[in-house]
Amino acid sequence: MKMSEALKGGAAALVLVATAACGDTGAEKPAAAVTQIELPELNVTDAELEGNPFRAEWTGAYGLPPFADIQTGHFRPAILKGILEARAEVQAIVDNADAPTFENTMLAYERTGQSLNKVMGVFGNLSSTDTNPEIQALEAEIYPILTTERDAVTFNPKMFARIKAVYDQKDSLGLDEQDARLLELTHRNFVRAGAGLAPDVQAEVSKVNAELSSLTTAYGQNLLAASKGFKLVVTDEARLKGLSADFKNALDADGNKTWEIGLDRPVFEEFMTTAEDRDLRAQLFDGYRLRSSSGEFDNNPLILKIVQLRAKRAALMGYKSHAHYVLENRMAKTPEAAIDFLAKVLEPALKRAAEEQADMEKLAGTPITGSDWWYYAEKVRSEKYAFDESQLRPYFQLANVRDGAFEVAERLFNITLEPSDVKGWHPSVEAYDVKDNATGEHLGLFMIDMFSRDSKRGGAWMSGYRESSAMDGNVIRPIITNNMNLVPPTEGQPALMSLDAVETLFHEFGHGLHGLLTNIRYASFSGTYGGPDYVEFPSQVLEHWATEPQVLAEYARHYQTGEVIPQALIDKVNKAATFNQGFKTTEYIAASLIDLHWHMLTPEEAAEITDARAFEKSVLAKYNIPETIEPRYRSTYFSHIFDGGYSAGYYAYLWAEILDADGFDAFKQSGDIYNPELAAKLKKWVYESGGLRETDELYRNFRGSDPGIEPLLRNRGFADPAPAEG
């Protein structure tokens, strides 16, 4: 893996983008003579590296990191050593007196940064799942250094000259498809990062990049501290009326009749849906939406500075705004096109949301507020469809849902997932050896970390400890992880899931399969390569199988009796599938519009913003978002865009829904949700292909045509249903 990829954090971490780093002894000299970026002097001694597990070959099963041997103190010296080794590797390419060739420039660059990536693959993941004050302090120190290291490579004129020399010969080199794609993407990435800018502009961009690295790291740490620091404590059990016994037991982990409700999304949604105490719902609602909006962990000043710096950088690079820069190579192409798309879906969503609110207020007999929506929506659903979430949960035991997702993947893609007894980074982690069912070939190691803990960031995501590659005859298969934040069950009890959590498990497993099945020889565009508006397609399309009656019959079994979920209950689920979609669609689009409007600001416009909340409210008012519907994220806790890889890209989940709805529609139209011909195309052109071709071409190769928006609108209940099969 080349150094610039290592600096991105190894395998893609979706919802979180983990930045990566490298280090050495200091004997090598930085490339100061040929780069505009001044690199810091770094030193690490052999004594500091003595016994460091990151400097040893990992000979255990699957080449898994020896988690039991890794201590926090091992990271810094190993990172510094990796940085210095990566500098030397790049310098060797620059100093090569031979004329630039694909081998001595492109492949040599692809090989750089391996020791750095080794340590950062672990550091980037553990800082998300098992952080501590020492790790957080190291993040604040290391990530700006890594950003500068990346810029030093990008802005090295001799390095770019060599890459450009090879690129200019591309049509005469006789490259195969993957070699040609490596050359195309590497050259493109250098150009888009500013390799062709004037030296004084490059220096300014590098300063902005380093400052942004510090600010986004601080943002994420503030959010984690604020989120984990909030607890709604209840000591009167009578106030918990409506909550299930299992949920109450999970909130009272110590059994001392003190119930603590935190802000992890599964906990938040279940409490807001079932708790009858309106005042407690309002307190939790405010705790959730006011995170990091004041006090010690206030993110407001960071937001304003991040937005200003992103706008400044875009202008330095010749773009109207950060959003215009980001979307240039995405499927939407421009932020205006993304907003037009969102507006088309928002119009019917607002109409439906108004109908939903009227139904709830009729039932409640009083006007409702934002903190009432989940509770009364569930009451209306129960009245309209004669079922609620509590009826489903006993059929969604985590172990069975996991096995159901595995069964879908095995049938679609002819693979197997076999339990492995290797030890992970936490006692609750499970591991599975993924194999090709036809050949028995090892495809990767899949590891799952399902439960929340105080050291773990919120949300759900896919990541990886190692990416796939096959260079120089050395086949390396990936180590992929899925992470969720389910409420840990009380001892001796099973983990039961909501329908939303079930769909999230399938979603993240879709990302995981995208990383596991990749068939690309170069790590820099293997696995989950591509913009969010495409990368969310392989994850979201798998969600469709989760609620298919044929699939539910396989895994949805009552945790006590083993009874298969009754068909009558499945019918109710399907009839209610579009219920509350006005709210769900509007809250999502509201957050997407906030994201796009932040990042469409010019430097002058960004400098005029002094109140982040006022800016948000102006955006919401522009699109007539009702006050009763809170955006999915306010800016102060919008980690996707201020501490992740989705800036100007949160709209991508809905854009990708065009693809996933249209793609699954092909299976439904065929009459077989496991149609082998379609499944083979989906595997080849989506899950195996990484960034082999442009994303719209990959989709067409699978589907045979461009997607239409109609299946998306039907799935959300905003258009007439498709004609019945047959």
Image (tube, rainbow, N blue to C red):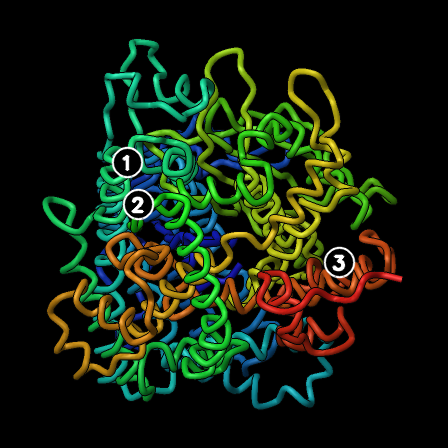
Location of mark 2 (residue): 371
Along the line of sight, which residue is nearer the eye, 414 or 268? 268
Q: Is residue 683 left or right of residue 259?
A: right
Residue at x 48%, y 54% (from the top left corner): 14
- Residue 388 seen in the current view: yes
Tag of residue 278: 1
Which of the 4 quarters of the picture holds residue 51? top left
Location of mark 3 (residue): 683
Residue at x 29%, y 12% (from the top left corner): 257
Neighbour class for label 3 at 10 Å: few (<14), some, many (≥20)?
many
Residue at x 80%, y 53% (from the top left corner): 673
Along the line of sight, which residue is nearer the eye, 683 or 337? 337
Give residue 56's position: percent from left, percent from top. Answer: 49, 36
Neighbour class for label 2 at 10 Å: few (<14), some, many (≥20)?
many
Give residue 223's position: percent from left, percent from top. Answer: 25, 46
Along the line of sight, which residue is nearer the eye, 304 or 379? 379
Please state which amino acid type lies under the numbered disc 1.
Arg
Task: Tell whether label 1 touches label 2 (CB within 8 Å).
Answer: yes
Q: Is residue 118 above or below residue 159?
A: above
State the separation of the CA atoms marked 2 and 1. Answer: 8 Å
